[in-house]
Image (cartoon, rainbow, N blue to C red):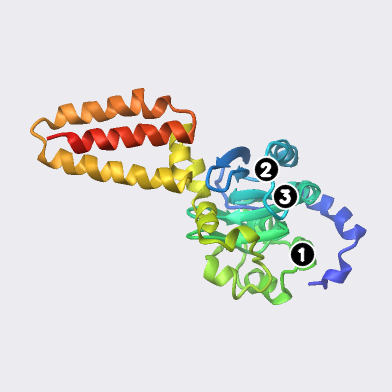
Amino acid sequence: MRNARHWTTQHRLTRTWLFAALLMLPGVLWAMEFKIYYQPDLKLKMVIGKGKIQSGDAEGFLAAASLADRDSEGLVPLVLDSPGGNVEAAFRVVDAMDQVRVYTIVPDDARCASACASILFASGERRSVMGTGQLGFHSCYRRAGSTYAEDSLCNEIIAANAMQRGVSHAGINRFVKQYGAAEMAWVGRNIACTLLHGLCRPGLLETQPATKAALTRSFNCSELISAQAQLVCGDSQLASIDKTMAEVFNQKLKVSTNKGRLRAEQRAWLRNSRNACGDKACLLKSYQLRVAELKRRD
């Protein structure tokens, strides 16, 4: 593989040859979606990128990024959960990422594999694998009928891009050489951020335990359906009182002589009080009143 000094305009033009080259797991069908998630503890609107990378994703990313906020370093947080996809489409997303300046994050329960790991994740100005997040690596390949053939040129271009962004040559080669097209090496934070030198570049948001925790749970919270559930999940104070309320409710349920009625009252509270809220202040008051009400029950 060539040294990063050889990343030239010719390399960028050569990428167009790779439009048919895929870095993905066979059988994955969903498309990549970019959406905005507001993280209340961080007071940041983040971009969540989920699904298979395909043509047109650069435009989708730019549209979402235009609605997002920037962290203290001026970067748009981009949470990734993707099995990979089309290599050329991934590089087009990277071109868009370079325009915007992003902080790529793979948090709890998110997985970023193939083109997602070796191209998108590796191209963030700041890069973090957090909690149970995982990166998946294997050799670049193209379809050859019903089989997959290793693509050395594709690997070379991906390596040049990663090395230009500070990833070590040894780190890049570690999995490209050891794992072929049909294999996947899944690595967590401990390996990705220590053995693969230069791959992780933590941002300032990770320096404080509270903001690091908020980033770590960002993907799980963004997956919740209702805005109220997202707020409770993402806000440490609301999450704490939600836990207290659940504990008090379960204690009362154990000794209740009319468990059906208590459950019905709880569902009514969720429907008519909690889920009628649109902000933290309303939710906090709703929880406080419900906890006090439950504690007063005989």
In the image, residue 198 lies at what x, y percent?
Answer: 69, 71
CA gap, disc 1 to disc 2? Answer: 23 Å
- Amino acid type, mark 3: Ala
- Residue projecting furthest to the left: 257
Q: Quadrant of the N terminus?
A: bottom right
Q: Which residue is mark 3?
A: 90
Kindly identify the residue that appears in the image at 30 percent across and 27 percent down.
269
**Horizontal arrangement in the rendering, residue 174 relative to residue 226 (left or right):** right
CA gap, disc 3 to disc 2? Answer: 23 Å
Q: Is residue 44 above or below residue 144?
A: above
Quarter residue 228 falls in: top left
Q: Which residue is mark 1?
A: 165
Quarter residue 124 falls in: bottom right
Crowding at dot 1, Cα within 10 Å, few <14 / some 14-19 / many 20+, comes out as some
- Residue projecting furthest to the top: 272
Q: Which residue is mark 2?
A: 69
Kindly identify the residue that appears in the image at 43 percent across and 40 percent down.
232
- Amino acid type, mark 1: Arg
Looking at the rendered structure, the secondary structure element under dot 1 is loop
Nearer the N terminus, badge 3 or badge 2?
Answer: 2
